[in-house]
Image (spheres, grey):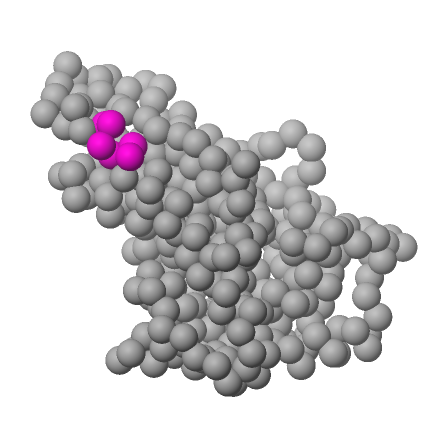
C-alpha cells in the first residue's frame, strides 16, 4: 500500500499525453522504453527514447527511480508518520532541526514562490485544507463555521517558517503544519528527470499524478504533444493540445475535487488569506516552467489568485500559462502569448 501524498491537483494536463506513440515512425536504433507504478497516492509514468547502447540500462534506471520515489515520500509525505516532514510537524514551536538537502530545497523554493505570489501559495495552509475536508481527515458534509475558519487562520502563515540556508536549519516560530502536496509531486518529477539525464538520456517524458516534464523529442524527431483537459463534468474531453519540450508542466482545477451544501459548491483550493475555498470563475490553469516543481506550485498559486491577477503575474514574468474561465454560456479561454505559440492547430 502506498503511503504518499493526497492528490490535490488532478491529472488534467495528461488526458492524451501518451498518444505521442501514434503516428511515430520508429527508426531501428530508437525505441521508447516505459516504466510505471504507484507513488504519492497516485501513478507515475516514465518514458524515454532509447538507443541500443542505453537499452541495457533500464533495469538500473528502474532501481534508481524506485528508490528515489521512496526517498521523496520518506522525506516529504504527511501520510507517513515517521517521515522527515511529519517529525518536523510534530515538533513544538521554537524548536529547530537540520533538514535534509531535498527537504530544505523544496521548502526554500516554496518560500520563494510564496513571497513572489504574496502568499497565494502557502505550504502551511494544511489546517484549513483539513478543516474543509480536503486533507487526510474524513470528508465533511457541512461547511465549517466562521469561528472555526478564523481560528484556523491563526494557525497558518509561511512567514512563520524560518529557513537558514547556511545550516539548513528549519524552525517554526509558532505551531505550524507543513503540507507539501502542492509542490512535492512536481519535485519528484524533476528528481526522476535528473536520474534519466545522469544516464545520458536526453529525450524523455516523466509524469507523476498529472505533473510532468519533457526533454528533447520523440522518435522521428517529433515534438512531444500534451492534451489539456476541458474542465467539464462526466466524460473527459480535450480542450487544447500543445507541443512542449525541455519544460515542466502542471495543471490545477476546481472541477473534480469539491463538495456541495445548500446549492453552494466548495472547491478544494483554499485561499490562505480568507481561509475559504476560492469563489472566482477560474476553472483550470496550466502552467509551464523550467522545472515541474515550479509549475506545480504556481498552478496552485494561480488558482488562488484568480484569472485576472494570475494572468497579469504570468505576463509580467513571461510565464507560459493557459486559463479556462467559467462563464454563463460555458468556458472562456485566455492564454499568454508564449503559450499560444505552443498550440497544435
Residue at horizontal 47%, vertical 63%?
85
Q: Residue 101 colored magenta?
A: no
Q: Quadrant of residue 287?
A: bottom left
Residue 199: horizontal and vertical position, in percent? 16, 39
Q: How many marks?
A: 0
Q: Residue furthest top?
A: 28
Quadrant assignment for the N terminus: top right
Tell me if 153 is positioned left or right of 109 in this view.
right
Q: Nearer the viewer, residue 170 or 317?
A: 170
The furthest residue to the right: 262
- Placement of 283 over or under 149, stated as above or below: above
Q: Which residue corresponds to the image point at 69% horizontal and 33% vertical from the top-left?
A: 234
Q: Percent from the top left, x then y, of residue 61?
A: 24, 34
**Camera-side residue: 32 or 239?**
32
The residue sitting at 75% across, 51% down in the picture is 139
Verify whether residue 60 appears in magenta. Answer: yes
Task: Judge whether 114 appears above or below 100 on screen.
Answer: below
The spot of residue 12 in percent (x, y) is 53, 41
Secondary structure mostly taken by the magenta-highlighted segment of the chain: helix
The residue closer to the viewer here, 7 or 279, is 7
Q: Which residues are magenta?
A: 58-63
Q: Residue furthest front?
A: 82
Residue occupying the point 71% across, 46% down? 329
Q: Which quadrant, please, contains the C terminus?
A: top left
Could you say which is closer to the camera, residue 272 or residue 104?
A: 104
Give residue 32's quadrant in the image: top left
Side of 151 relative to 34 (left or right): right
The vertical placement of 59 against 175, above or below, is above
Residue 230 in sight in this render? yes
- Is residue 279 at all visible to an observer of this figure? no
Amino acid at each position: 500500500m502506498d503511503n504518499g501524498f493526497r492528490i490535490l491537483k488532478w491529472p488534467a494536463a495528461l488526458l492524451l499525453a501518451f498518444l505521442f506513440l501514434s503516428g511515430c515512425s520508429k527508426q531501428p536504433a530508437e525505441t521508447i522504453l516505459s516504466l510505471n507504478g504507484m507513488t504519492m497516492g497516485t501513478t507515475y509514468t516514465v518514458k524515454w527514447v532509447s538507443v541500443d547502447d542505453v537499452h541495457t540500462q533500464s533495469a538500473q534506471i528502474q532501481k534508481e527511480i524506485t528508490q528515489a520515489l521512496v526517498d521523496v515520500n520518506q522525506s516529504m509525505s504527511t501520510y507517513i508518520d515517521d517521515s522527515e516532514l511529519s517529525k518536523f510537524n510534530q515538533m513544538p514551536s521554537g524548536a529547530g532541526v537540520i533538514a535534509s538537502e531535498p527537504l530544505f530545497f523544496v521548502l526554500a523554493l516554496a518560500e520563494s514562490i510564496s513571497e513572489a505570489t504574496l502568499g497565494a501559495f502557502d505550504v502551511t495552509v494544511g489546517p484549513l485544507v483539513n478543516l474543509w475536508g480536503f486533507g487526510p481527515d474524513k470528508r465533511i458534509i457541512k461547511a465549517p463555521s466562521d469561528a472555526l475558519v478564523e481560528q484556523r487562520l491563526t494557525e497558518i502563515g509561511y512567514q512563520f517558517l524560518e529557513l537558514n540556508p547556511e545550516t539548513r536549519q528549519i524552525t517554526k516560530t509558532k505551531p505550524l503544519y507543513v503540507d507539501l502536496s502542492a509542490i512535492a509531486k512536481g519535485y519528484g518529477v524533476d528528481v526522476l528527470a535528473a536520474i534519466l539525464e545522469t544516464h545520458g538520456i536526453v529525450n524523455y517524458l516523466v509524469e507523476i499524478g498529472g505533473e510532468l516534464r519533457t526533454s528533447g523529442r520523440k522518435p522521428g524527431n517529433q515534438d512531444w504533444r500534451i492534451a489539456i483537459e476541458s474542465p467539464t463534468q462526466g466524460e473527459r474531453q480535450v480542450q487544447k493540445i500543445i507541443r512542449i519540450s525541455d519544460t515542466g508542466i502542471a495543471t490545477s482545477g476546481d472541477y473534480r475535487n469539491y463538495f456541495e451544501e445548500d446549492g453552494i459548491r466548495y472547491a478544494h483550493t483554499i485561499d490562505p488569506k480568507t481561509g475559504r475555498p476560492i469563489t472566482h470563475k477560474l476553472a483550470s490553469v496550466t502552467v509551464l516552467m523550467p522545472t515541474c516543481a515550479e509549475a506545480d506550485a504556481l498552478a496552485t498559486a494561480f488558482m488562488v489568485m484568480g484569472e485576472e491577477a494570475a494572468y497579469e503575474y504570468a505576463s509580467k514574468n513571461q510565464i507560459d500559462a493557459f486559463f479556462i474561465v467559467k462563464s454563463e454560456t460555458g468556458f472562456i479561454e485566455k492564454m499568454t502569448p508564449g503559450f499560444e505559440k505552443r498550440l497544435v492547430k
